[in-house]
Image (tube, rainbow, N blue to C red):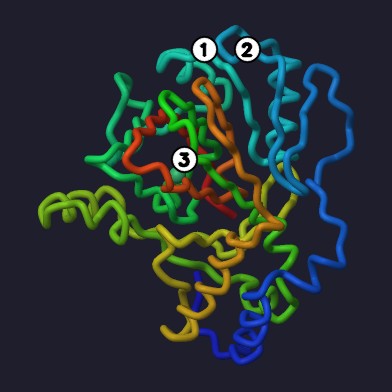
């Protein structure tokens, strides 16, 4: 999709990247941050926004019950606007969790992670014998050709303190990029690959077989959400191996600058889990980071992801 590019001004990109490292100013400080929603009122839901551009709690809804079309339509609109929705005190089993996910599309079966009774329900369980490893900014399964549209995560057992999850709005992060960086990344693609994460836990034979099933894939560096037209930074620290078509050192520096943008608090929301809490995020436009600050106490979560489209 891309050929070696000698037209990018990498000196300007590095200068902009060094400036950004201290915080996204003045581009962001001098701009009104908003969710990017349509402003259309909600009549069946009452979202309570949690961050400037990302996150809303949705009170008064029982995800274990059938949901009518009007509620589902507003949930979809709220997901596009707030990017991650939070629900408290839900009484979900693995079966009900999967049933709720089916409202949004076909659940994706994760090739590597352990399951919780059903093939589409992933179990993420950590304790003193298996400390948490999800404290790296990423979007789920971007190493697949059609990465998940959404992820639905349910708290099964959570520590009394610690184990929060953070999400970053990568469209807000794109909006905060200086012109030199936006110009540089326009039209670029990047290679995503599982080998630097899940692959490290595999034997040589397992890795060879998994590589055949999941070869490296190229996705655009700037992705557009079809429903809203929002552009976003679509590279992450876990699965993006390299920027295609540029020199190795230039590409590595550019990838660092872009993945770093998830770290700015202006673009983030942080959620404190309770038993029965559920988070539903648009996995296309967000990245997330699960804090590993609860060792040796256990933290058990279950997740269903919903198959998405090829990024464009
Ligand atoms: Fe994740």
- Give the labeled residue for mark 2: 62
Label 2 C-beta lies within 8 Å of the nearest ligand 1 atom:
no
- Give the labeled residue for mark 3: 163
> Relative to residue 41, is residue 294 drawn left or right?
left
Whole-angstrom CA distance, mark 1 to mark 3, is: 20 Å
Q: Nearer the viewer, mark 3 or mark 2?
A: 3
Query: Badges 3 and 2: C-beta atoms under 8 Å apart?
Result: no
Secondary-structure class at tag 1: loop
Q: Where does the C terminus fall, quadrant-wise?
A: bottom right
Q: Nearer the viewer, mark 1 or mark 3?
A: 3
Query: Badges 2 and 1: C-beta atoms under 8 Å apart?
Result: yes
Between residues 16 and 75, which one lies in front from this camera angle? 16
Image position, residue 58 (x, y; %):
70, 25
Image position, residue 134 (x, y; %):
40, 48
Image position, residue 178 (x, y; %):
73, 76
Of the residues under marks 3 and 2, which one precedes in the sequence?
Answer: 2
Which residue: 34% across, 30% down? Answer: 123
Which residue: 77% across, 36% down? Answer: 49
């Amino acid at each position: 999709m891309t050929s070696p590019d000698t037209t990018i001004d990498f000196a300007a990109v590095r200068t902009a990247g060094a400036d950004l490292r201290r915080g996204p100013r003045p581009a962001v400080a001098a701009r009104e941050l908003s969710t990017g929603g349509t402003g259309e009122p909600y009549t069946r839901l009452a979202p309570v926004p949690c961050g400037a551009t990302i996150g809303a709690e949705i009170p008064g809804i029982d995800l274990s019950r059938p949901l009518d079309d009007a509620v589902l339509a507003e949930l979809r609109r709220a997901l596009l606007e707030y990017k991650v929705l939070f629900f408290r005190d839900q009484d979900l089993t693995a079966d009900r969790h999967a049933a709720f996910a089916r409202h949004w599309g076909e659940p994706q079966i994760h090739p590597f992670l352990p399951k919780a009774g059903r093939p589409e329900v992933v179990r993420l369980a950590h304790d003193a014998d298996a400390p948490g490893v999800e404290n790296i900014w990423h979007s789920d399964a971007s190493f697949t050709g059609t990465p998940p549209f959404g992820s639905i995560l349910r708290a099964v057992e959570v520590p009394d303190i610690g184990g929060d999850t953070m999400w970053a709005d990568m469209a807000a992060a794109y909006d905060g990029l200086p012109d030199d960086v936006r110009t540089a990344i326009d039209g670029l693609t990047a290679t995503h690959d599982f080998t630097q994460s899940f692959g490290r836990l595999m034997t040589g034979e397992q890795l060879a077989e998994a590589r055949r099933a999941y070869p490296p894939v190229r996705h655009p560096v700037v992705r557009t959400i079809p429903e809203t037209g929002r552009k976003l930074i679509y590279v992450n620290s876990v699965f993006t191996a390299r920027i295609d078509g540029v020199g190795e050192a230039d590409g590595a520096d550019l990838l660092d600058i872009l993945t770093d943008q998830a770290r700015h608090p202006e673009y983030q929301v942080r959620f404190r889990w309770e038993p029965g809490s559920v988070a539903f995020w648009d996995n296309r436009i967000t990245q997330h980071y699960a804090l590993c600050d609860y060792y040796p106490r256990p933290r058990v979560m279950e997740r269903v992801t919903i198959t998405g489209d090829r990024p464009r």
